[in-house]
Image (cartoon, helix red, strand yellow):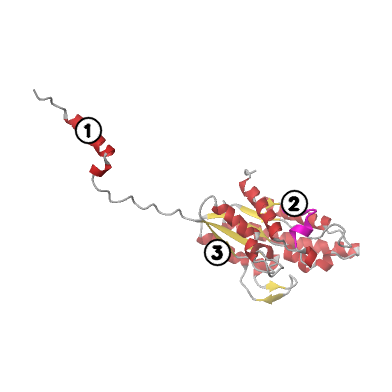
Amino acid sequence: MRTKFPFSALLISAIMLASLSPHLAAPSRGAAAVPAPTPLYYLALGSKAAIGYQMDPAVDWTHGYVYQVRDMLAATGPVELTNLAHRGECSDTFINGGLAADCSTKVIDSPSQMAEAVAFILDHAGRMRLITVDIGGANFNSNLKLVMNPDLVQRTTYLIKFYAQLVHDWNVIFGTLRQACPNCEIVALNQWNPFPAGSTKVDVAPIIVHYNDLMRMAARPYHIRMADVYTPFVGHALTYTWFAKGDGHPTTEGYTVMANVVWQVVNAPAS
């Protein structure tokens, strides 16, 4: 007597046979291609430090903090860097365009970095991963003789005017960036002190600390987080900057410190 198998049992047997013997199964057409993830964007804004300036011509500019942060971001997912920083950019030229040798006289026609940044943000709405901005250091460097005037009264008078202009410009810059991208992660870098203790007649540390406090207060209403690069540079100016060769911009080691500070801020819980 022939044993009768129900149709469902035959179907199950066929499926099991196909899975155990791939060579007996129907030829595969190949797995569907998985589209590459859409990259997000990292927008860098600022002046010399943001473009990775190095005083020594033997050292290329690809070691700047911006490029190191880009690599850190890339380790978490596809990211593309757009760096709009200009060498010699001051806070007022950032807003209005032009490059000024002393942050007051327009000497070169160039587009407004802020306008370029806003256009980029709007063109890539919803795809911004990070915006970093360090602006104001060129103002400080371009007016160093006035900032360090040994006459206390003259120095104080100048610094009041100097800080007032910076605070105004920071509010315009931070407010404009936040308006263009309400939900973006925006990190502003404060100013390091490139002068080793005792290397100047006027102690610059309190002046830079005040500068950084004003920047932090300007950034707060716009929910822009601060990367404190000042603190780790204290006591390391000769290692982290080119001060020994007459320049206060960071060395590769200094840029690495800056990148790590930015990365810590990016990964810190929102307050």
Q: Is residue 225 visible?
A: no
Assess whether residue 240 is covered by the magenta stretch.
yes
Amino acid residing under circle 2: Pro
The residue wearing badge 2 is 232
Mark 1 is surrounded, within 10 Å at the Cα level, by few (under 14), some (14 to 19) or many (20 or more) other residues, namely few
Q: Is residue 228 visible?
A: yes
The residue wearing badge 3 is 119
Image location (x, y in percent) of residue 222: 65, 52
Q: Is residue 185 left or right of residue 13?
A: right
Q: Give the quarter of the image for residue 55.
A: bottom right
Image location (x, y in percent) of residue 15: 24, 36
Q: Which residues are magenta?
A: 229-241
The residue wearing badge 1 is 13
Query: Alpha-carbon distance for marks 3 and 1?
Result: 62 Å
Mark 3 is surrounded, within 10 Å at the Cα level, by few (under 14), some (14 to 19) or many (20 or more) other residues, namely few
Amino acid residing under circle 1: Ser
Which mark sits nearer the N-terminus, 3 or 2?
A: 3
Which mark sits nearer the N-terminus, 2 or 1?
A: 1
Q: Give the quarter of the image for residue 236.
A: bottom right
Q: Is residue 224 left or right of residue 198?
A: left
Mark 2 is surrounded, within 10 Å at the Cα level, by few (under 14), some (14 to 19) or many (20 or more) other residues, namely some
Q: Quick one: 263 or 1, which is closer to the camera?
A: 1
| Majority secondary structure in the magenta region | helix
Please name the residue shown 86% across and 61% down the image. 199
